[in-house]
């Protein structure tokens, strides 16, 4: 029963760290920054733990705050004039077993070239398998805007993949 | 509502964007920062209590001082009123005295 649920902070980290880290990584393209964002998001969750009512609430909260903090981090980087995805070649501290496949790596690079609002919609659609309605709720954006971002982002990504990922992508 | 069918490209995109495992030290770092922040927030609570006590003491002292000042001013006003009353009474007595002296002179 949702009313009886008691949040266990460590368990929530175990369950959702991969999601939070991956969202931040795909949005920022920087492992170090993504780790920092993931830490901040979980510490913020810890401060709000009393208001979390159910496992689903925790998941939705973490998803929404991870996207929001990633957008904040990107804004700060733009203000400081730091170029995005500068560290992707070094995979910044990633150990051998964490390295993505060559295709995933190249898709992530292509995704990084897509405008931020479209990228956010695409990451939530294809990483988190969310519907446009769920994406709209997670981003706090109108449904029509999300649908437009998804369409445009996918079209742009398709066009880029057709040029850069010919050897991998059959459907591009 | 029926979900929209996804094509081959979207399927490949989905596969490429599968969640990545978080770094193994992420949880440890979060727990460490949580411990540090817990210590810091306990210190903050004590500092806040100290600040609140100082403010309370300052307000109480101010109120006591203001009360003392008001009482002193009231006392001074009362003293002045008594002096004024005495002056008026003295003036009236002097007038009566003068009138009596005048009558005495006339009677003689």
Image (cartoon, rainbow, N blue to C red):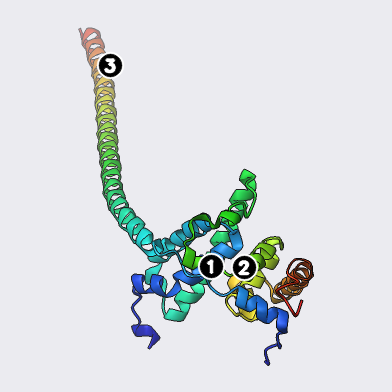
Q: Residue furthest bottom?
A: B2
- Percent x, y for residue A129? 60, 80
Which residue was labeled with disc 3? Answer: B95
At a point 25% along the width and 15% down the height, the residue shown is B94
Looking at the image, residue B105 lies above or below residue A112: above
Q: Secondary structure at mark 3?
A: helix
User: Could you say where residue A93 lies in the image, as x and y percent from the top left?
Assistant: 48, 56
Q: Which is closer to the viewer, label 3 or label 2? A: 2
Q: Is B49 in front, or is A47?
A: A47
- Which part of the image, by quadrant, shows the N terminus of chain A? bottom left
Residue labelled with disc 1: A22
Image quarter of residue A162: bottom right
Query: Seen from this angle, which residue lies furthest front?
Result: A167
Q: A69 or B12, which is in the foreground?
A: B12
Q: Chain of mark 1?
A: A
Callout 3 and callout 2 share a chain: no
Q: Are marks 2 and 1 in contact (CB under 8 Å)?
A: no
Determine whether, in the image, residue B98 is placed left or right of residue A92.
Answer: left
What crowding class fits label 1: few (fewer than 14 Cα within 10 Å), some (14-19), or many (20 or more)? Answer: many
Q: With respect to residue B35, does A132 lie above or below? A: below
Tag 1 secondary structure: helix
Of the 4 image quadrants, the one containing the C terminus of chain A is bottom right
Q: Position of residue B61 (x, y in %)?
A: 25, 37
Q: Is residue B53 left or right of residue A166?
A: left
Report if residue A140 is visible in the image: no
Determine whether B104 is above or below B21 in the image: above
């Amino acid at each position: 029963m949702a009313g009886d649920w008691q949040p266990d902070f460590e368990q929530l980290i175990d369950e959702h760290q991969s999601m939070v880290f991956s969202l931040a990584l795909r949005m920022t393209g920087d492992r170090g920054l993504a780790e920092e964002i993931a830490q901040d998001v979980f510490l913020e969750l810890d401060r709000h733990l009393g208001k979390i009512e159910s496992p689903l609430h925790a998941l939705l909260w973490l998803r929404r705050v991870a996207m929001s903090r990633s957008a904040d981090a990107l804004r700060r980087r733009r203000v400081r004039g730091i170029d995005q995805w500068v560290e992707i070649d070094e995979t910044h501290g990633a150990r051998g077993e964490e390295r993505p496949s060559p295709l995933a790596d190249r898709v992530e690079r292509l995704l990084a070239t897509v405008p931020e609002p479209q990228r956010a919609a695409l990451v939530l659609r294809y990483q988190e398998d969310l519907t446009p309605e769920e994406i709209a709720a997670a981003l706090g954006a109108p449904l029509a805007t999300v649908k437009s971002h998804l369409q445009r982002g996918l079209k742009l990504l398709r066009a880029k993949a057709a040029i850069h990922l010919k050897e991998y992508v059959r459907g591009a | 509502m029926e979900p929209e069918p996804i094509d081959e490209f979207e399927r490949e995109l989905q596969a490429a964007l599968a969640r990545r495992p978080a770094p193994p030290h992420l949880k440890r770092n979060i727990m460490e920062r949580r411990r540090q922040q817990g210590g810091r927030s306990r210190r903050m609570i004590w500092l806040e209590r100290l600040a609140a006590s100082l403010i309370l003491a300052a307000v109480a002292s101010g109120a006591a001082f203001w009360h003392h000042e008001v009482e002193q001013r009231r006392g001074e006003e009362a003293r002045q009123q008594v002096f004024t009353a005495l002056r008026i009474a003295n003036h009236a007595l002097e007038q009566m005295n003068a009138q009596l002296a005048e009558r005495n002179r006339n009677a003689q």
